[in-house]
């Protein structure tokens, strides 16, 4: 009796254990054949065998209503005009519409050009690869579980696609090219909007679709970050995990304005409403990103974050934080103001690009220095350290960068001799000012920079 109970328990446990979801991986090449196909098969089979059972084939005869019945998703790494009959095409579309998954990598968009329904299914059509190089990719949907491990962005070397027949009204974009890391004047670049998507999802009937443009070379398939994204995508396609897939149609970014002028100012104080070289500044507005918040996590802030790009005098600048209503960015130390129509002096032009659309340009006053203090710390030895921004140009001084203009600092109404004024080592856009505290000067500190 004891043996029977144990056997019954094992049987029930096995019955309750979820069976792996089945994925049909199709690698038929009717056009260019990628050398990385063999590696891709090994990688997909190894991703999560207890949860996903991947069957690879180049035999298109399996794509029928009956042949697909036992699969939970189909994934293409294909090329060219696949020899599918009308019945096979209808079977594939109905398979996805009925609630199953369809995915594609790299040249899956370089496939079935003459079949409009496939273009709608995959989400876009290949339109050349202007770049084969190392680039930075911006994760503009950083909380999406398919790509959250890649946020806020990463670098990778691959053959980089661009697309036509692509619309953010139909797909939810997960990743895009940081255009500051490619040559936009390279031969074959066709997108004037600089909106180069590299991964997206969308619903198709009751089914789910995922696509990534990466995957040309073996090294990409062997990259653990890429593998984790593919695993997450397959789990989502087969219903193991949930992730948002509704499109986020873009609205034109707009920089806010108020009674004081354009809502752009020193990030420490929001005053003055002006920008100088090396200033950390804040922009308020609406639709400044396609919908997500993102924060830079490295000392080297990227020039695209959360789907947003800030341009000053036409050039992208580093961004530390981006959200639909606020962006914190860094003015270059080489920034120069010009005569752009504002009364009383020089200005710089600021624009925000997001989701393939660009805000109306605004002119912001420019000054050599626009100091603002984030914090003042009593060091306990008769000195204090001020963490500031907007102190202007710097020059090299050994391993440090000192401000060209040494500020005069007043704390609690008393002049404080400056020991050092320059960029804070290891920080983006932050200045460090060390001062001597006169006797009797104690927190709280009221700090003023007096030019």
Image (cartoon, helix red, strand yellow):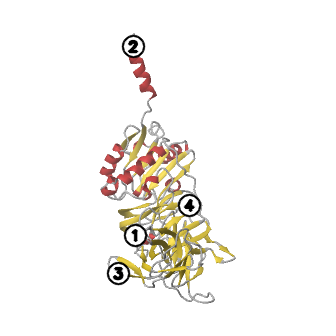
Q: Which residue is mark 1?
A: 130
Read off the residue under disc 3: 397
Rounded to the nearest whole Å, what is the CA distance between mark 1 and mark 2?
Answer: 66 Å
- Mark 2 or 4: in front is 2
Sequence order check, earlier mark of 1 and 2: 2
Pointer 4 residue: 168
- Secondary structure, mark 2, is helix
From mark 4 to mark 3, how far is it between C-alphas?
49 Å
Task: Point out the tag, 2 or 3, that comes first from the N-terminus.
Answer: 2
Considering depth in this image, is 240 or 82 the residue closer to the camera? 240
The furthest residue to the right: 259
Q: Position of residue 245 (x, y in %)?
A: 55, 51
- Comparing labels 4 and 3, the label whose residue is closer to the camera: 3
Could you tell which of marks 1 and 4 lies nearer the N-terminus?
Answer: 1
Callout in the foreground (1, 2): 2
Q: Marks 4 and 1: in contact by CB < 8 Å?
A: no
Q: Is residue 423 visible?
A: yes
Q: Toward which corner of the image does residue 432 lie, by quadrant?
A: bottom left
Mark 4 and mark 3 lie on one chain; the one further toward the N terminus is 4
Label 1 SS? loop
Identify the residue shown where x is 42% and y is 36%.
Answer: 20
Front residue of 33 and 191? 191
Find the distance from the CA under tag 1 to the CA under tag 3: 42 Å
Q: Position of residue 92 (x, y in %)?
A: 49, 45
Residue drawn at 41 percent across, 53 percent down: 82
Regarding mark 3 in the picture, which secondary structure is present there? strand
Does 173 sit above or below residue 425?
A: above
Q: Residue at x 56, y 68 (%)?
A: 444
Which residue is tagged 2? 4
Q: Quadrant of residue 382?
A: bottom left
């Amino acid at each position: 009796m004891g043996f029977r109970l144990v056997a019954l328990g094992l049987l029930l446990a096995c019955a309750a254990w979820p069976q792996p979801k089945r994925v049909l991986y199709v690698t038929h090449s009717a056009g260019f054949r990628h050398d990385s196909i063999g590696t891709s098969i090994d990688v997909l089979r190894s991703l999560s065998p207890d949860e996903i059972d991947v069957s690879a084939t180049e035999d298109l005869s399996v794509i029928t209503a009956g042949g697909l019945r036992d699969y939970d998703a189909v994934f293409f790494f294909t090329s060219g005009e696949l020899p599918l009959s009308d019945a096979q095409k209808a079977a594939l579309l109905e398979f996805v519409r009925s609630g199953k998954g369809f995915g594609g990598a790299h040249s899956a968009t370089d496939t079935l050009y003459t079949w409009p329904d496939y273009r709608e299914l995959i989400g876009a059509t290949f339109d050349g690869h202007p770049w084969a190089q190392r680039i930075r990719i911006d994760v503009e949907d950083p909380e999406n579980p398919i790509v959250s491990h890649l946020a806020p962005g990463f670098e990778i070397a691959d053959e980089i696609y661009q697309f036509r027949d692509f619309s953010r009204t139909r797909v939810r974009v997960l990743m895009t090219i940081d255009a500051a890391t490619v040559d936009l004047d390279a031969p074959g670049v066709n997108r004037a909007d600089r909106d180069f998507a590299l991964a997206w999802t969308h619903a198709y009937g009751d089914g789910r679709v995922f696509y990534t443009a990466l995957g040309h070379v073996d090294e990409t398939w062997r990259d653990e970050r890429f593998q984790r994204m593919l695993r997450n995508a397959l789990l989502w396609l087969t219903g193991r995990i949930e992730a948002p897939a509704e499109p986020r149609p873009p609205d034109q970014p707009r920089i806010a304005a108020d009674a004081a002028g354009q809502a752009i100012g020193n990030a420490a104080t929001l005053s003055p409403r002006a920008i100088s070289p090396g200033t950390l500044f804040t922009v308020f507005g609406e639709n400044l990103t396609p919908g997500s918040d993102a924060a830079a996590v490295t000392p080297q802030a990227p020039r695209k974050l959360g789907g947003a790009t800030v341009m000053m005098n036409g050039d992208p600048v580093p961004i530390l934080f981006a959200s639909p209503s606020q962006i914190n960015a860094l003015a270059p130390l080489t920034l120069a103001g010009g005569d752009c129509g504002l009364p009383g002096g020089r200005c710089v032009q600021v624009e925000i690009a997001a989701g393939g659309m660009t805000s109306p340009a605004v002119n912001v006053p420019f000054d050599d220095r626009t100091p603002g203090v984030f914090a003042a710390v009593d060091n306990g030895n008769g000195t204090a350290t001020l963490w500031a921004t907007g102190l202007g140009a710097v020059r090299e001084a050994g391993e440090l960068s000192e401000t060209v203009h040494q500020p005069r600092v007043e704390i609690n109404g008393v002049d404080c001799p400056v020991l050092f004024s320059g960029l804070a080592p290891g920080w983006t856009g932050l200045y460090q000012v060390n001062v001597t505290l006169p006797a009797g000067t104690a927190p709280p500190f009221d700090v003023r920079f007096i030019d």
